[in-house]
Image (spheres, rainbow, N blue to C red):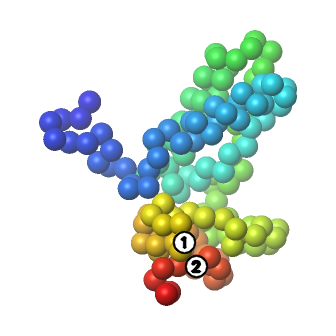
């Protein structure tokens, strides 16, 4: 527990959403068990894991163990993380190569009309596009 006056979230980015990937995986696991799927895919990135505790390999492994304990005996899905060892630049390059409409994706936690360009998520996104040598086509407030 935190010391007096210290927040439990003080070492986390301002964009941290508590247990976000755990919630996503829980919903996906319920659907996967119902549909008898043997794999669940999630787009976590190791590059993010220092700031987001539910993006790292340790969390994913622990969640797989929880699924083994908390689901029917004959259901043992594996959690697949195909992007985990890619950089944001590599992910942007791959997405552009396979035709993902990145202009329909959103990363900003501060605004909905135009990305702020300043929050941790925007900075990671912009760094990824710059590293891929590509222009991000979503609107940014700083351009206005």
Compared with residue 25, is residue 52 higher up or lower down, i.e. above or below?
below
Left or right: residue 81 versus residue 8 is right
- Mark 1 residue element: loop
**Residue at the image point whose x is 53% and y is 66% from the top:** 112
Q: Residue furthest bottom?
A: 144
Q: Which residue is mark 2?
A: 139
**Residue at the image point whose x is 46% and y is 83% from the top:** 142
Query: Quadrant location of residue 113?
Result: bottom right
Q: Position of residue 61 (x, y in %)?
A: 60, 32
Q: Residue furthest top?
A: 73
Graded by Cα atoms within 10 Å as few (under 14), some (14 to 19) or many (20 or more), the crowding at tag 1 reads: few
Q: Nearer the viewer, mark 1 or mark 2?
A: 1
Q: Residue furthest right?
A: 36
Q: Position of residue 121 (x, y in %)?
A: 49, 63
Q: Is residue 94 visible?
A: no
Compared with residue 69, is residue 13 higher up or lower down, i.e. above or below?
below
Q: Nearer the viewer, residue 2 or 49?
A: 2
- Mark 2 residue element: loop
Left or right: residue 48 versus residue 95 is left
Q: Which residue is mark 1?
A: 113
**Residue at the image point whose x is 67% and y is 54% from the top:** 83
Q: CB of mark 1 within 8 Å of CB of mark 2? A: yes
Q: Residue furthest left?
A: 4
**Residue at the image point whose x is 58% and y is 79% from the top:** 139
Using the numbered discs, state the Cα–Cα distance from disc 1 to disc 2 in whole angstroms. 8 Å
Q: Quadrant of the N terminus?
A: top left
N-term mark: 1 or 2: 1
């Amino acid at each position: 527990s935190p010391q007096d006056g210290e927040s439990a979230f003080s070492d986390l980015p301002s964009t941290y959403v508590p247990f976000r990937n755990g919630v996503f995986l829980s919903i996906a696991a319920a659907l996967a068990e119902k549909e008898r799927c043997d794999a669940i895919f999630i787009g976590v990135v190791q590059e993010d894991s220092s700031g987001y505790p539910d993006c790292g390999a340790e969390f994913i492994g622990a969640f797989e163990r929880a699924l083994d304990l908390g689901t029917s005996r004959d259901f043992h899905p594996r959690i697949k993380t195909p992007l985990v060892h890619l950089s944001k630049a590599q992910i942007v390059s791959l997405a552009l190569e396979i035709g993902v409409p990145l202009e329909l994706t959103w990363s900003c936690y501060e605004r909905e009309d135009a990305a702020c360009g300043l929050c941790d998520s925007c900075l990671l996104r912009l760094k990824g596009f710059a590293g891929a040598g590509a222009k991000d086509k979503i609107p940014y407030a700083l351009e206005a």
